[in-house]
Amino acid sequence: MMQQPKPKIGVLIEEHFDPSEFRRFNEYFPTQGFEVEYLSHLWGNDSLTFTSNPTDGVIEESVTVHTDVQEVSPQDYVAVILIGGYAMDRLRYQAEIVPGQPNQAPAVQFLRKCVASKDLKIGTICHSLWLFCADQRLIAGRKVTCAHNVVCDVANAGGLVQYDGNQTQEMVIDGNLITGKHPGMVDRFMETIIQEIEQMVAVSS
């Protein structure tokens, strides 16, 4: 008897990703029955290898990505996560810009499709709302949290940053968007994503 394929969680990634989040994604999600598939813009290559932010000058993690965002659909996943670090800034890069036209980077185009998919959970953590900031229409009016260093970017793009006193909140859920503050709460972030997926499945069944 053939085994049913595991539901997939797509993780957008590029160079300078957060290594602690990367490790925890790979450890936790498979134990919950989900396959983790890394996605990026591959610039016409069959694969590209990306490395993490250095820790004390040492690069601890690397990943070879074989899946291009232009070759997949949000419907292939139960959730899509934007990894932290500086990866999402790199993914919003456009080789050419048309004045007055919204950002056309492949990852931004994929994110637009994700946001339009009602049954898809989207997770961001730390700096990764940067990809949403590439197009104000993706984030304007959404309640979110993020790392303190990108609060201005998010607010200028129209995101409604949520606070707890003089700190940004650790976790915010606004519809299908789940945002986490920083890598220190990655476990809670992942657990919340699984809970949100389970609730979605329960409602649809």
Image (cartoon, helix red, strand yellow):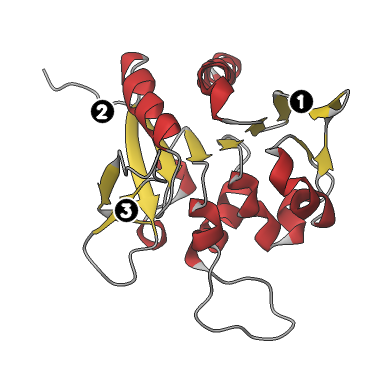
Q: Residues within 10 Å of mark 2 (few under 14, many from 20)?
A: few
Q: Residue at x 49, y 39 (%)?
A: 80
Numbered disc in front, either 1 or 2: 1
Q: Earlier in the sequence, mark 1 or mark 2?
A: 2
Q: Earlier in the sequence, mark 3 or mark 2?
A: 2
Give left or right: position of 4 versus 13. Answer: left
Q: Which mark is residue 65?
A: none
The residue that label 3 is drawn on is 50
The residue that label 2 is drawn on is 5
Percent position (x, y) of residue 33?
33, 18
The image shows residue 29, relative to residue 55, as above or below, that is above
Q: CA distance from mark 3 to mark 2?
A: 27 Å
SS type, badge 2: loop
Do residues under tags 3 and 1 come within 8 Å of each other at their CB atoms?
Answer: no
The image shows residue 81, relative to residue 88, as above or below, that is above
The image shows residue 126, relative to residue 69, as above or below, that is above
* Residue projecting furthest to the left: 1
